[in-house]
Amino acid sequence: FDVAACIVKVLRVSRNKSLAYLTDESGLVLKLFRDHKDHAVDPFSLGAAQTGPVVTAFLDVQISSFDTSEQCAVGDWTLLTCKTNRMMQIRCEELQTWCKSPQGIKFCCDVVNRIDSMIPLCIEPFIEKKVCVGYFLHLHEMQNRITGSEVSTLYMVLIDCGCGALLKAIITKKLLQDAVHFCYSLTKSILDEEGISLPLVSEFLRNNQVLFYFLLHDRQSYAGIPSMFEITQVSPANIDGILKMHSSIAN
């Protein structure tokens, strides 16, 4: 797959892997991964002096999937992939003009803000996944789930989504531990390997009032349980990204 696009954001995933977000006037976003050596400082050959959206073209990118959480296509840099502007020079010139226009600048900023906030442009077509931003209010132990030889404890949580909206969801012990550790680096008094003191954890999360980002899966789609979501990802919300996204929408 050959592509000419504006690179709006580059992230280092690990020591030897980076990703770039590409987009154009169509609104489609492509997340391109590339493996590289540890010392690589410019894996996509954009130039250290470049700032803002960078127009470039790649040949033979392998499109692998579609990320329904971020709502973007996913591609991989292979042994055959290379950068070239000559073969798509006219298209690159068109994109350069668009990127510098007021509409292009705003659109690229909106894409970056949406990526940073982790809130997709539209989630409705993918009904098995939902995004929620809110606060932990209450939790209690629900049941144990057996997967093969593993037994995991599930907890019911109540999330304050704002505007009087409350959402019930289930969460695993591992993700609950992650949420607590995000609030406080050492919480042995309320959370340890042997068990969880639910009253203390509930009080701790309510008192610390960290705004969390939740990625939820609808259990109805595979377990027949209506109006029940399972939290599959939890992390502190990017408040700055959310504010920028809403400010851009308001303007």
Image: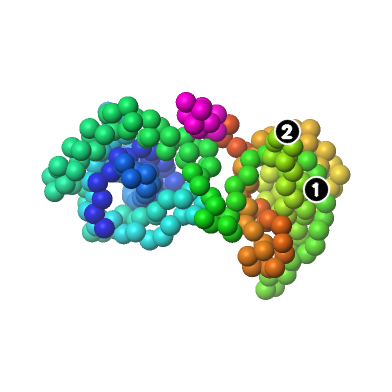
| Residue located at (74% from left, 37% from top) | 164
Residue bearing the label numbered 1: 139
Residue 228 screen position, x and y as percent = 71, 57
Q: Which one is nearer the viewer's eye here, 82 or 115?
A: 115
Residue 177 screen position, x and y as percent = 71, 48
Looking at the rendered structure, the secondary structure element under dot 2 is loop
Indicate which disc, 1 or 2, sits on the residue closer to the N terminus: 1
> Is residue 20 among the parts visible in the rendering?
no
| Residue located at (72% from left, 41% from top) | 165
Real-space CA distance between mark 1 and mark 2, rounded to the nearest whole angstrom: 14 Å
| Residue located at (83% from left, 51% from top) | 140
Against 4, residue 125 (above or below) is below
| Residue located at (23% from left, 34% from top) | 96
Q: Quadrant of the N terminus?
A: bottom left
* Residue 234 counted in the magenta span: no
Q: Is 138 displayed left or right of 251 in the figure?
A: right
Q: Is 211 displayed left or right of 243 in the figure?
A: right
Against 240, residue 42 (above or below) is below
Q: Rate crowding at label 2 as few (under 14), some (14 to 19) or many (20 or more) other CA atoms within 10 Å.
A: few
* Residue 243 counted in the magenta span: yes
Region of the chain picked out in magenta, as a range: 240-251
Q: Which one is nearer the viewer's eye here, 234 or 228?
A: 228
Looking at the rendered structure, the secondary structure element under dot 1 is strand
The amino acid type of the residue labelled 1 equals: Leu
